[in-house]
Structure formats: structure tokens, C-alpha cells
Image (tube, helix red, strand yellow):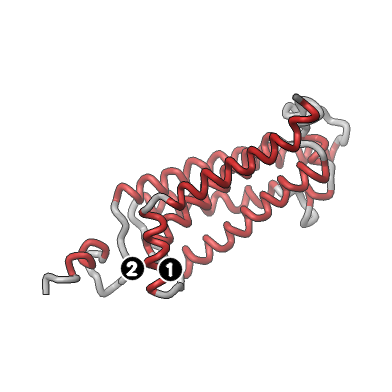
Amino acid sequence: MQQTTNASSEILDPANPSADPRPVPPRGQRYRLFGEMLIFAIISLIASWVLSYEAILLAANPDAELACSINSLFDCATVGKTWQAKVFGFPNAFLGMIAEPVVMTIAVASLFGVRFPRWFMFTANVIYLLGVIFAYWLLYQSTFEIGALCPWCITVTISTTFVFWSMTAWNIQERNHYFSEKTAEKLERFHRGGWLTIALMVWLAAVLLLEIVKWAPTYL
């Protein structure tokens, strides 16, 4: 019976395999992925705080000069005074002030070995996916509708992208999802082969290229 249990003994918790049948990713993966998640969540939180502060300044004085209003292209004030900056009736940055501390808590707890329930990590991944989609919708609005970019908003967008990547990579390895065994194995091979990282790099490169193509004719 040394058979297939060799593979399973490497992925099941040796302390009590019957308690939690989910695979246990290598410790190095835990430190790397949750370390990245923590760093980028902190960056996103700082950017969200700055955006929240600037939203308050603009609410008090629409003509306020913001430090990140560099020129006609990078102009936080122009973006901050649009309806897209307050989709839910309050500054979008407030959402980051709420969400990022939760992500930071997950990251810190996980770095110390806490294993959250599958439903919790799966739900966090889905909710954060919605956040990433919202961030890129705002980037689209800034690029093609508003006609100006917000440096701090871009910082949030990039940071949330990396947080989502780290969370997704971990959830694939720990199988914090409800896909079939066959699909789970395909996802794990996709991640082990480095394709998840390649997809991230291709995505960011495509977004950067799109921005260059959009703005280069005007500013270069």
C-alpha cells in the first residue's frame, strides 16, 4: 500500500489527515503567497486612504489642488469629481478601506499557519474578484470616458490584481473551491506549470499596451 499514498501523504496534513482532507501546500508557498498578499494589501490600503482623504478635500472644496494632479493626463481631481468616483453614493476608496484590512488579517493569520474554512476562502476569492472587476471598470472609465488617469487609482488597481493572483494561487493549491476532482487537477497543473503567473504578466502587459496606444498619440 505504499502506492498512491506516497503522493497523498505529501499533500494531506500529517498531524490529522481525517480532520481536513484539503491538500497542504508547501510552507514556502504559504510564506511567499501570503507575504505578497500582505504587502500588496498594505499598498492598496495606503492608496485607498489617500484617495479617501482627497475625496474629503474635494467635497469641501471642488477647486482644491491635489498633489497627484500632475498634468492633464494624470489628474486625480478630474477623476475624483466624476460620478464614477462615487458609484455607490460615497467615495469608492472607502471600499478599499473596508476590504484591505480583511485581506491583511487573512494574510497575517495564514502566515502563522491558520487554515480558514474552504467556504470562507472561496467566498473571499469571489468577492475579491468582484473588486478587481470593479477596479478595471473604473480604469476603463478613466481611460475612455473621463479622459484622465488617477495615479493612486492605478496603484489600487495593480495592487488588487496581485492580491487576487496570490489568493487564487493559494486556493487552487489548497483546493478552496467546489470544482470537480478533474477540474481541480487541471487547475493545479496550470498553476504548477507557471501558467497562472504567465497569465498575470500577459494581462498586465496588455493593459499597459492599451494605455500606451490610447494616450501616446496625444502626449508623445
Coordinates of residue 109 in the picture (x, y in percent): 40, 53
Q: Nearer the viewer, residue 113 or 179?
A: 179
Q: Which residue is mark 2?
A: 22
Q: Nearer the viewer, residue 128 or 4?
A: 4
Q: Quadrant of the C terminus?
A: top right
Q: Is residue 16 above or below residue 131?
A: below
Determine whether the residue tagged by mark 2 lies in a helix, strand or loop. Answer: loop
**Disc assigned to residue 27:** none
CB contact under 8 Å: marks 2 and 1: yes
Coordinates of residue 66 in the picture (x, y in percent): 77, 29
Residue depicted at x 79% and y 26%: 71
The residue sitting at the left extreme is 1
Q: Is residue 29 above or below residue 182?
A: above
Circle nearer the N terminus (2, 1): 2
Question: For the residue carrying disc 1, how many other residues have a C-alpha within 10 Å: few (<14), some (14-19), or many (20+)?
Answer: some
Determine whether the residue tagged by mark 1 lies in a helix, strand or loop. Answer: helix
Q: Locate residue 215: give its quadrant.
A: top right
User: On the picture, is 7 further left or further right than 46?
Assistant: left
Cα–Cα span, label 2 and label 1:
9 Å
Residue depicted at x 71% and y 45%: 139
Q: Quadrant of the N terminus?
A: bottom left
Residue depicted at x 82% and y 42%: 146
Q: Amino acid at mark 1?
A: Arg
Residue depicted at x 80% and y 35%: 77
Question: For the residue carrying disc 2, how many other residues have a C-alpha within 10 Å: few (<14), some (14-19), or many (20+)?
Answer: some
Coordinates of residue 19 in the picture (x, y in percent): 29, 73
Q: Nearer the viewer, residue 117 or 146?
A: 146
Whether residue 15 is visible: no
User: On the picture, is 100 further left or further right than 214?
Assistant: left
Q: Which residue is mark 1?
A: 118
